[in-house]
Amino acid sequence: MSPSSARRARKSAAPEAAPPKRPFVAHHLSPPHEVLSEEETKQVLARLQTPPERLPKILLQDPGLLTDPKFAPARDAGENLVGRIVRIRRPSATAGEAIAYRLIVPAIGGD
């Protein structure tokens, strides 16, 4: 066995351990997201006088949703979050606080 093939054999023989899953830590530039309840979703749509399809979309797997402490437990419990609205509050120099709404759509993989 040549030295190079011995090195290759050692590298391929050792299985790579999966890296440990890191806990989610919200970035300081990520604005807080708040998943609204079904009742609040209906109220917001009535106030905006728009159908939900006209709102900008956000994917169910978007990491920004993890800034809401209620999101992960609801997702893990199997609660249907698709079709609900997310309220995003951003600081604004002119308005003080800008509020944006997004409609949760299913993940690309169909989750």
Image (spheres, helix red, strand yellow):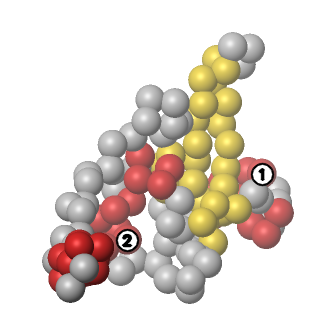
Q: Which residue lies under the disc numbered 1?
A: 48
Say which residue appears at 67% left-offset and 20% top-offset.
92
Say which residue appears at 20% left-offset and 61% top-offset.
20
Residue 66 place in picture, x, y as percent = 41, 53
Secondary structure under tag 2 reads helix
Residue 16 place in picture, x, y as percent = 22, 73
Tell me, for residue 75, which label it has, or none. 2
Residue 72 place in picture, x, y as percent = 34, 62
Which of the 4 image quarters holds residue 44? bottom right
**Sequence-earlier tag: 2 or 1:** 1
10 Å crowding of disc 2: few (<14), some (14-19), many (20+): few
Residue type at tag 1? Leu
Residue 35 place in picture, x, y as percent = 49, 56
Secondary structure under tag 1 reads helix
Tell me, for residue 32, which label it has, or none. none
Please state, as top left, top right, bottom left or bottom right, where the N terminus lies in the image: bottom left
Circles 2 and 1, Cβ within 8 Å, touching? The answer is no
Say which residue appears at 61% left-offset and 78% top-offset.
108
